[in-house]
Image: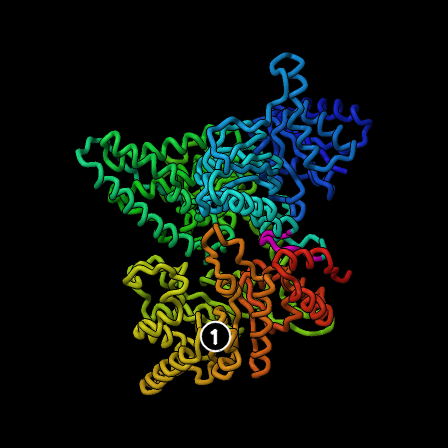
Amino acid sequence: MIGIVIVSHSKQLALGVRELAAQMVQGQVSIAVAAGIEDPENPLGTDSIQVYEAIASVFSDDGVLVLMDLGSALLSAEMAIEFLPEAQQQKVYLCEAPLVEGAIAAVVAAAAGRDIHQVMAEARGALLAKATQLGVVSRPLSLVTPTTNVESSTREIRLIVSNRLGLHARPAAQFVTTAARFQSQILVRNLTRNTELVRGDSINQVTTLGVRQGHELLITATGADADEALEALQGLFANNFGEAARSCCSNKEGLPNPEGEDNVALNSPPALHHEVTPATHGELSGIAASAGVAIAPVVHYQSTHISITEYHVDDPEPEWQRVQAAIHTAKQEIQAVFSQASLQIGDAEAAIFDAQLLFLEDPVLLEAAKERIFEHHINAEAAWQAVVDKVATSYRTLEDSYLQERVDDVVDVGQRVLRLLAGNAPANLHLEEPAILVATDLTPSDTARLDPRKVLGICTTSGSATSHSAIIARTLGIPAVLGVDAQVLHLADGTLMALDGESGKAWVEPESHILDLLAAKQEAWQTAQQEARATAHQPAITRDGRQVSVFANIGSINDVQVAVASGAEGVGLLRTEFLYLDRTSAPTEQEQLEVYQAIAQVLDNRPLIIRTLDVGGDKPLPYLRVGFPEANPFLGWRGIRFCLDHLDLFKTQLRAILRASVGHQIKIMLPMIASVTEVRAAKVILGEVQAELNQAGISFDAAMKVGIMVEVPAAVAIADKLAAEVDFFSIGTNDLSQYVMASDRTNPSVANLVDALHPAVLRMVQQTIQAAHAAGISVGLCGELAADILATPILLGLGLDELSVNPQSIPGVKQAIARFSIVESEAIVASALQQDSAEHVRELMSTSVIPPA
């Protein structure tokens, strides 16, 4: 049965509400209380650990409903959910219903056997009876479609939003980009909140509808393709905006656990017994946003202030052209941030920047800016600032706190364009020595640029635990305390600070006993992580005895240290693009040599597969521009094509790799191969570099193996010919999926089609493996599919020799491999290849795959 949790600042209030609610159902429903704090002097407050324990005490697979009063109660509830295993997180729902009335309505509905969504609906409607009785309303809110002047071709549908966070940034982006594909005018209204109709092609108008889980929407389409438009939008809702697969997950990486057991969440806080209480000298209290302990000198960061002066212009056309040019450049910058963030924090979290790109394409925003320039005859900076401020205000006035926080993204992208209009350089975030960054706030773009090796902690005077900046900080593993007193901004650079991202406290010039306690807590944290990873250092062996290598995909020196600590048996993909980012010119041979040697040294003779430079598509570099516009950059001058046309660049990298190979197990991998000619051309160049090194008396591994990425359908079609030219294959399912499905994976309008579990993609993978094994060479897979535990039996059954995943996923993947036998997996593959869609493959995996006990 559904569990109920009551969160309040007052323990007495919460206990009274629980007693009243319990009497309504004679104790049939489990009700837990998380209220007040253990401080006799100031007992009012909330504690996320209390909330976590309360949720755990009444947890049920049927769901847990959390009701809260105001202020920190909501924040504590949100933080508590993050402490739960991912599988349990998906079954806990925060409800904005009134505490007393909502609790009574919820327990009655739960006792009647209603499901979690029905219970939430009852709680949300709890005030209606009282309002009606008092004469505040004479009837329930009408759900009748407003009268509008529309043509006879108008169609409409009503849909219930089922994904957990409603239309937050990414689902809203999918909705808008889908609506924008059609000629028909799409309007949408939140019936649950009784809003007005707004334009469906406006990211800001759709987001500010405040759509959450369980809300009902009315969507109208007027035009020749109205039926097709509504069918496409209905498909998004039916597919939970691509979030359905994550609802069954049980670990931080979003990996489904086929046994339904709780994998160890390596990034969740361990049980700690070193509390730092009570308040001491120099202690600051804030919001616990990203767990972990940091002790370091502070360094202040302040974004560049842009001063705007409004002035009259006689000719508005040049001002509008300036806005368009700045937006174009801003898009390129955001795309570069997305590319770097993908390397550093993964595609899933980097997708935060997809919504920023859509903001710059919002027709309502652009029309408003243009209108302001032409009607008021004012300069571009003033017009743009006014329009962005208006949008930001509309977010801030929303009742939904989660959606209020999306204003950070609006301000972030708005300031980027304003900076370009004003000709200002971006603020410098480079640190010479490790430090704790102190700031008023950090934008998502700022945070994505942080180097965890130098930024040991974050302390800001504003922000929240659910902001995109906080999410990125957690993904990067940087401890963060937000919302501290503004006095921290007056500290001198170099002042020693300690912060605890779990408790939300920071200490300025901490006393020795505080440092000792924090050091003990830090050590306990590290010990817990080491214990959790202990089993990950065992080989991955199936139940019938076949060993499968589990390697890591990395994009930095820091990544390789995490990979080894997580149990990686080698590196299956070193993305060398990180060496070329944040620079004005390509790295030298010596710079690359030092990095490759450092990574190989950490691996201690484990295999290291270095992919040669793969730029283009979604990975542009400012100083390596193609030189002409590419309508379809994913189909253009990228990967091996680019390198073969830039021989100095290519040879420099090959020389560095060859020189680093001495005494190490290094292999070269060529990206984006589509023909035998490309492989042979690259091998000729490699031979020339080897000859030059021989002539110069420079040592290298003459037997170093050369492989290719299989990520283009053409490579699959001629895999037998390619296998005769190289020593190994590595299948890149991220690109292969988009090319097979003819869908740009960075375009939210069609990104849902890019699914590596589609039978068409799986058949390509099977064909590649068969060709490789027939030629006697090994084949691995380094796309995101390798980290999807739902797909593990399929990958085993297809016969892959190795899987290469992000370092954090290694323990879960190894556990999954050990649960299956090859015989069982081959049977699963046979069935999966006969399905007609990725959705049906996922259904097959989630319903028919029963791993051994």
* Quadrant housing residue 437: top left
Amino acid type at mark 1: Ile
Question: Does the magenta run of residues contain 254?
Answer: yes
> Seen from this angle, which residue lies furthest left?
314
Residue furthest top as drawn = 135
Measured along the vertical axis of the image, is residue 515 above or below residue 853?
above
Give coordinates of residue 470: x percent, y percent: 49, 43
Residue under the point 62% across and 41% down: 162
Bounds of the magenta span? 249-258
Q: Is residue 777 magenta?
A: no
In screen coordinates, is 241 left or right of 360? right
Can you say whether 560 is above or below 701 in the image? above
- Residue 29 in the image: x percent, y percent? 78, 32
Q: Is residue 509 visible?
A: no
Q: What residue did someone put label 1 on?
A: 708
Q: Quadrant of the N terminus?
A: top right
Q: Residues within 10 Å of mark 1 (few under 14, many from 20)?
A: many
Callout 1 secondary element: strand
